[in-house]
Amino acid sequence: MKLSTKGRYAVMAMADIAAHRDEQPISLADIAERQEISQEYLEQLFAKLRRAGLVESVRGPGGGYCLAVDADELWIADVVSAVDEPMQVTRCQDGDAVNGCVGGGKCVTHELWAALGRQIYGFLAAVTLGDVVAKRNLALAASVRRAKSHPVSTTPTG
Protein backbone atom coordinates (compact mmCIF):
# COMPACT_ATOMS: atom_id res chain seq x y z
CA MET A 1 0.00 0.00 0.00
CA LYS A 2 1.28 3.41 -0.84
CA LEU A 3 -0.13 6.29 1.15
CA SER A 4 -0.32 9.25 -1.20
CA THR A 5 0.71 12.77 -0.34
CA LYS A 6 -2.87 13.67 0.62
CA GLY A 7 -2.86 11.48 3.71
CA ARG A 8 0.76 12.08 4.67
CA TYR A 9 0.59 15.84 4.23
CA ALA A 10 -2.72 16.11 6.07
CA VAL A 11 -1.24 14.30 9.08
CA MET A 12 1.93 16.42 8.91
CA ALA A 13 -0.08 19.65 8.81
CA MET A 14 -2.39 18.59 11.63
CA ALA A 15 0.63 17.59 13.75
CA ASP A 16 2.16 21.00 13.02
CA ILE A 17 -0.96 22.73 14.32
CA ALA A 18 -1.03 20.52 17.42
CA ALA A 19 2.67 21.16 18.10
CA HIS A 20 2.17 24.94 17.81
CA ARG A 21 -1.20 25.18 19.51
CA ASP A 22 0.05 27.92 21.86
CA GLU A 23 0.41 30.18 18.81
CA GLN A 24 -3.16 29.65 17.60
CA PRO A 25 -4.49 30.13 15.05
CA ILE A 26 -1.84 28.80 12.68
CA SER A 27 -1.65 30.14 9.14
CA LEU A 28 -1.29 27.81 6.19
CA ALA A 29 1.71 29.88 5.12
CA ASP A 30 3.47 29.00 8.38
CA ILE A 31 2.61 25.31 8.03
CA ALA A 32 3.71 25.33 4.38
CA GLU A 33 7.06 26.86 5.29
CA ARG A 34 7.79 24.59 8.26
CA GLN A 35 6.66 21.37 6.57
CA GLU A 36 7.82 22.25 3.03
CA ILE A 37 4.39 21.66 1.53
CA SER A 38 2.79 23.85 -1.13
CA GLN A 39 0.34 26.32 0.41
CA GLU A 40 -2.06 25.75 -2.49
CA TYR A 41 -2.06 22.01 -1.76
CA LEU A 42 -2.67 22.68 1.93
CA GLU A 43 -5.65 24.89 1.03
CA GLN A 44 -7.25 21.93 -0.77
CA LEU A 45 -6.57 19.59 2.15
CA PHE A 46 -7.81 22.03 4.78
CA ALA A 47 -11.08 22.56 2.95
CA LYS A 48 -11.69 18.83 3.42
CA LEU A 49 -10.42 18.79 7.01
CA ARG A 50 -12.74 21.70 7.85
CA ARG A 51 -15.75 19.99 6.25
CA ALA A 52 -14.94 16.89 8.30
CA GLY A 53 -15.00 18.99 11.48
CA LEU A 54 -11.34 18.37 12.35
CA VAL A 55 -10.18 21.99 12.10
CA GLU A 56 -11.75 25.39 12.57
CA SER A 57 -10.80 28.44 10.56
CA VAL A 58 -10.35 31.96 11.89
CA ARG A 59 -10.65 34.76 9.34
CA GLY A 60 -8.99 38.14 9.27
CA PRO A 61 -5.60 39.43 10.36
CA GLY A 62 -3.86 36.84 12.47
CA GLY A 63 -6.27 34.22 11.18
CA GLY A 64 -5.54 30.64 10.36
CA TYR A 65 -6.53 27.21 11.60
CA CYS A 66 -6.81 25.46 14.92
CA LEU A 67 -7.83 21.94 15.87
CA ALA A 68 -11.56 21.43 16.39
CA VAL A 69 -10.84 18.28 18.39
CA ASP A 70 -8.26 17.75 21.15
CA ALA A 71 -5.13 16.13 19.72
CA ASP A 72 -5.42 13.23 22.18
CA GLU A 73 -8.90 12.46 20.84
CA LEU A 74 -8.12 12.85 17.15
CA TRP A 75 -7.34 9.54 15.46
CA ILE A 76 -4.87 9.47 12.58
CA ALA A 77 -7.30 7.28 10.60
CA ASP A 78 -9.88 10.09 10.80
CA VAL A 79 -7.40 12.61 9.39
CA VAL A 80 -6.44 10.31 6.52
CA SER A 81 -10.09 9.48 5.79
CA ALA A 82 -11.10 13.15 5.87
CA VAL A 83 -8.90 13.94 2.86
CA ASP A 84 -10.38 11.04 0.89
CA GLU A 85 -7.28 8.91 1.14
CA PRO A 86 -8.17 5.33 0.20
CA MET A 87 -6.81 2.78 2.62
CA GLN A 88 -6.84 -0.30 0.48
CA VAL A 89 -4.01 -2.56 -0.50
CA THR A 90 -5.83 -4.88 -2.87
CA ARG A 91 -6.01 -4.05 -6.54
CA CYS A 92 -9.78 -4.53 -6.61
CA GLN A 93 -11.71 -1.48 -7.70
CA ASP A 94 -13.76 -1.44 -4.51
CA GLY A 95 -11.22 -3.11 -2.22
CA ASP A 96 -13.45 -6.12 -1.58
CA ALA A 97 -13.45 -8.01 -4.88
CA VAL A 98 -17.10 -7.28 -5.60
CA ASN A 99 -15.94 -6.01 -8.96
CA GLY A 100 -13.08 -8.47 -8.85
CA CYS A 101 -9.38 -8.12 -9.33
CA VAL A 102 -8.85 -11.12 -11.65
CA GLY A 103 -11.48 -12.25 -14.11
CA GLY A 104 -14.32 -10.91 -11.97
CA GLY A 105 -13.19 -12.70 -8.80
CA LYS A 106 -10.61 -12.54 -6.05
CA CYS A 107 -6.98 -13.09 -6.92
CA VAL A 108 -5.05 -15.80 -5.10
CA THR A 109 -3.45 -13.29 -2.70
CA HIS A 110 -6.57 -11.17 -2.08
CA GLU A 111 -7.06 -12.23 1.54
CA LEU A 112 -3.41 -11.51 2.35
CA TRP A 113 -3.62 -7.94 1.08
CA ALA A 114 -7.08 -7.37 2.54
CA ALA A 115 -5.81 -8.49 5.97
CA LEU A 116 -2.82 -6.16 5.66
CA GLY A 117 -5.17 -3.28 4.84
CA ARG A 118 -7.22 -4.03 7.97
CA GLN A 119 -4.03 -4.05 10.07
CA ILE A 120 -2.92 -0.70 8.67
CA TYR A 121 -6.32 0.85 9.30
CA GLY A 122 -6.43 -0.65 12.80
CA PHE A 123 -3.05 0.85 13.61
CA LEU A 124 -4.00 4.30 12.31
CA ALA A 125 -7.31 4.08 14.18
CA ALA A 126 -5.46 3.38 17.45
CA VAL A 127 -2.92 6.22 17.25
CA THR A 128 -3.89 9.80 18.09
CA LEU A 129 -2.46 13.04 16.81
CA GLY A 130 -1.36 13.64 20.41
CA ASP A 131 0.68 10.41 20.29
CA VAL A 132 2.46 11.64 17.18
CA VAL A 133 3.20 15.12 18.54
CA ALA A 134 4.38 13.76 21.91
CA LYS A 135 6.59 11.25 20.05
CA ARG A 136 5.13 8.41 22.06
CA ASN A 137 5.97 4.85 21.10
CA LEU A 138 3.23 4.56 18.49
CA ALA A 139 3.20 0.77 18.26
CA LEU A 140 2.95 0.47 22.05
CA ALA A 141 0.28 3.18 22.29
CA ALA A 142 -1.80 1.42 19.62
CA SER A 143 -1.37 -1.98 21.29
CA VAL A 144 -2.37 -0.65 24.70
CA ARG A 145 -5.48 1.05 23.29
CA ARG A 146 -6.54 -2.10 21.44
CA ALA A 147 -6.00 -4.17 24.58
CA LYS A 148 -8.02 -1.75 26.71
CA SER A 149 -10.88 -1.68 24.22
CA HIS A 150 -10.97 -5.49 23.98
CA PRO A 151 -9.97 -6.87 27.40
CA VAL A 152 -9.24 -10.56 27.59
CA SER A 153 -11.51 -12.36 29.99
CA THR A 154 -9.69 -14.12 32.82
CA THR A 155 -12.79 -16.05 33.84
CA PRO A 156 -12.35 -19.75 33.10
CA THR A 157 -14.90 -21.23 30.76
CA GLY A 158 -16.18 -24.70 30.74
Image (cartoon, helix red, strand yellow):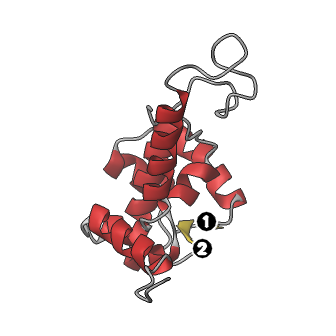
The quarter of the picture where residue 86 lies is top right
Looking at the picture, how far across and down is residue 78, in whole percent? 57, 59
The quarter of the picture where residue 98 lies is top right
What's under tag 1, amino acid-wise? Leu
Q: Residue at x 40, y 55 (%)?
A: 30
Q: Earlier in the sequence, mark 2 or mark 1?
A: 1
51 up-or-down from 66: above or below: above
Q: Residue furthest bottom?
A: 155
**Marks 2 and 1: CB-CB under 8 Å?**
yes
Q: Residue at x 51, y 65 (%)?
A: 75
Q: Real-space Cα distance between discs 2 and 1?
A: 5 Å
What's under tag 2, amino acid-wise? Ala
Q: Residue at x 66, y 60 (%)?
A: 50
Q: Residue at x 63, y 13 (%)?
A: 102
Label 2 neighbour load within 10 Å: few <14, some 14-19, many 20+? some
Q: Which residue is mark 2?
A: 68
The numbered disc on residue 54 is 1
